[in-house]
DNA sequence: TTAACGATTGACAGCGCTGTCATTTTTTAA
DNA sequence: TTAAAAAATGACAGCGCTGTCAATCGTTAA
């Protein structure tokens, strides 16, 4: 029923080994031969059997996505991006959700990937931000690609796809400044996340670039949650504060926080964006679930994942360009929660 | 490095075939032999190589989860539940997100699962609600399990895990009634979803059971979105309505709608739950992201998925109990958005 | 006690592919 | 033109397991 390598060999009049060579893009195949084989492949709609490949060869055509689960939307996007790259390149994806806090999690992951003969791992925060973990994996001769926050890779361990949160945060802050705001607050996410640090840096840099005085009391420590946004906004907009003490704009570290801040502000009867501008980050569904909809920064997560996976696979294939790094800068999405400072 | 079937055979002093028999729980192995083998398996930490199994045998140890992507949280829960059952039983999971609206989607899916020699499929709405699709898959001798809304399976095509939305919706409505509400509104989700229909039926049944008059103008057609909730609530609570014309409670078809309704109500300065009770459905993260937090119904999605997968696998293994059906009733979660009718 | 039966067990081929190494063909240099 | 080197191709074993079928064992009935 399904065409095998034998069928292709017979049809194209070469040995199965040559077909194998063509399928694996190996050199040492004459152009003419290659074309004959490719024609047969197309005619028979031949797709190599992954199980056989994995079994026979020393190579593996399986990669895994190891992740903890902070944000379902993010994970789903990642999965889809990785999957599309896998399909293009004839790889198989194993998903491996797990609890990054769990003791022995490293060993558990290693056990799983060893058993499945996984060739490489796609890593997102928090795993991508743990050099010891990455090293441990690399020791097993399993390739890794990391997606992380920053502008340059922190080390040479593996290829990285960097998400430049800093520049994006600067752009958002600049957007608020351009609207005439000078009293701009920052509600942070969890400080253990690199993204929080990076976004904070971007915020500071924008202020500095515009000679706007930094006011420490407008920086609220929080975490990546709605509630944190509510509390942050309450603190920033408290009744007992004078007009001068209150910010006119709030840059929240992500959309969830922004949604919380927005919510709190509305409870206080503050008009958005007339009296207060609020910006989020991530362009998550939350940002469209609020009223008014949030100004935010969009990350092309699927594309980032696809890109990272391609990097991983070319590493596995030992193709050149191993330590290439790509960088993405989330783009400003202006919606209705930010406006001209009155 | 990794133990193979040969190592186990050597250590336990039997042939590899006998080891194979033990690993597959086949009969015709003496108890003593079985135990010897199992001891060796444990000692060597032997796990059969999936690639080899899939290649050698006519059986396959791979299942796929085919889904469209309405709700990332739901999908993630499903994946985790399926995965845990797979691991327990030595199966491998392929995920297959796709667009259920796309033309030719059926053929595309078939192509994928044929190529990967998938033994069975886990299906959730909307795929689980398409009998023609299910039939088409079954023709290929690929097993199926469906997770769907209802109390009894709609047909005998495959085992089903039913989620009794109707009873749960009745319970929620009853909860509102118990709080003293008589004017209870229903904001529907998309009518193309069976879950909407079922929840509506539960709502009606509760009214009837309590001899509460049904008021058609309190049923709002909508879809599963925040915006739909906002619009529904605006319509229900409009200024020009008399007190009698306004409901005192709103049962929303899911949490997103409820969040929208809640939002709209607060904008109108209506106190929740003092002046208006709002209930959602699904216990999604949205329900904890609102203020006050939503009363809702919880579905144990991971467990449902795990259960469904076990059903699928026992079908694949041709174990008895093929057409068993399990049913789950989402449970009421009382939080702060519902209260005594004043 | 022995033939005959069913229950257990094992030998072996082969799933579809890749790695190794030998063979053939082509190219280059002498 | 021919030998040597390089490039292209193929023969074959074997990855770890399961299916088939034959061999062995223990047990029952005659």
Image: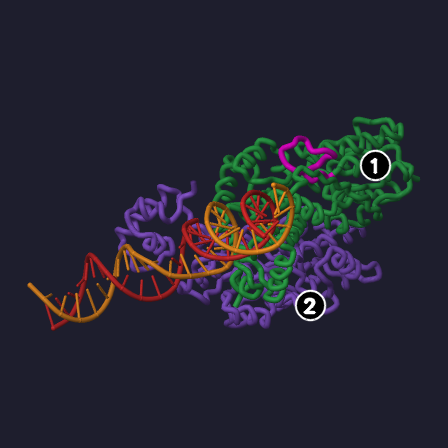
Chain colours: A purple, B green, C red, D orange
Q: In which quarter of the image is residue B320?
A: top right
Q: Mark 1 lies on which chain?
A: B
- Circle 1 packing at 10 Å, graded few (<14), some (14-19), many (20+), is many
| Image location of residue B312, percent across then percent down | 63, 43
Considering every residue shown, the one lying at the far right of the view is: B342
User: x, y (%) of residue A183?
Assistant: 70, 62
Q: How far apart are marks 1 and 2 (CA)?
A: 43 Å
Q: Which residue is drawn at 69% across and 33% down?
A: B153
Q: Is residue A267 left or right of residue A204?
A: right
**C9 or A48: which is nearer to us?**
C9
Circles 1 and 2: CB distance less than 8 Å?
no
Residue situated in front as seen by the camera: B221 or A261: B221
Query: Is residue B156 found inside the magenta-colored segment of the image?
Result: yes
Quickly name the residue at label 1.
B173
Residue at image coords 58%, 60%? B47
Location of residue A54 in the rendering, given as x and y in whole percent from the top left corner: 47, 57
Residue count near mark 2 (Cα–Cα under 10 Å), binned few <14, some 14–19, many ≥20: few
The stretch of residues the image draws in magenta is: B148-163
Left or right: B291 with respect to A40?
right
Q: Name the residue under label 2.
A: A103
Towards the viewer: B7 or B317: B7
Left/right of residue B262 with respect to residue B145 in the rendered view: right
Q: Which mark is residue B234?
A: none
Q: Characterize the magenta stretch by its predominant secondary structure.
A: loop
Whether the magenta-drawn stretch holds residue A48 is answered as no
> Quadrant of the image for the N terminus of chain A?
top left
């Amino acid at each position: 029923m399904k065409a095998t390598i034998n069928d292709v060999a017979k049809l194209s009049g070469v040995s199965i080994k040559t077909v194998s060579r063509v399928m694996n893009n190996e050199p040492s195949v004459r152009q003419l031969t290659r074309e004959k084989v490719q024609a047969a492949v197309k005619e028979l709609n031949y797709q190599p059997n992954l199980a056989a490949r994995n079994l026979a060869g020393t190579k593996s055509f399986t990669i895994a996505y190891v992740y903890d689960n902070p944000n379902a939307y993010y994970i789903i996007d990642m999965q889809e991006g990785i999957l599309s790259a896998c399909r293009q390149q004839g790889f198989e994806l194993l998903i491996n959700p797990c609890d990054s806090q769990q003791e022995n999690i490293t060993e558990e992951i290693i056990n799983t990937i060893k058993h499945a003969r996984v060739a490489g791992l796609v890593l997102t925060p928090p795993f991508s931000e743990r050099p010891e973990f990455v090293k441990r994996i690399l020791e097993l001769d399993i390739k890794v690609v990391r997606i992380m926050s920053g502008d340059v890779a922190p080390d040479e361990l593996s290829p990285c796809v960097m998400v430049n949160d800093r520049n994006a945060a600067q752009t958002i802050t600049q957007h608020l400044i351009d609207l005439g705001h000078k009293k701009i607050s920052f509600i942070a996410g969890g400080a253990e996340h690199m993204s929080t640090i990076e976004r904070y840096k971007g915020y500071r840099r924008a202020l500095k670039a515009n000679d706007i005085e930094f006011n420490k009391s407008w920086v609220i420590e929080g975490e990546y949650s709605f509630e944190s946004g509510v509390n942050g906004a309450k603190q920033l907009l408290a009744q007992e504060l004078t007009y001068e003490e209150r910010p006119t704009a709030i840059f929240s570290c992500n959309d969830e926080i922004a949604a919380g801040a927005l919510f709190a502000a509305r409870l206080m009867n503050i008009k958005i964006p007339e009296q207060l501008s609020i910006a989020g980050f991530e362009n998550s569904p939350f940002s469209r679930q609020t009223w008014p909809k949030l100004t935010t920064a969009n990350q092309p997560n699927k594309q980032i994942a696809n890109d990272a996976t391609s990097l991983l696979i070319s590493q596995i294939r030992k193709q050149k360009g191993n330590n290439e790094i790509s960088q993405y800068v989330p783009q400003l999405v202006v919606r209705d929660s930010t406006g001209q400072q009155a």
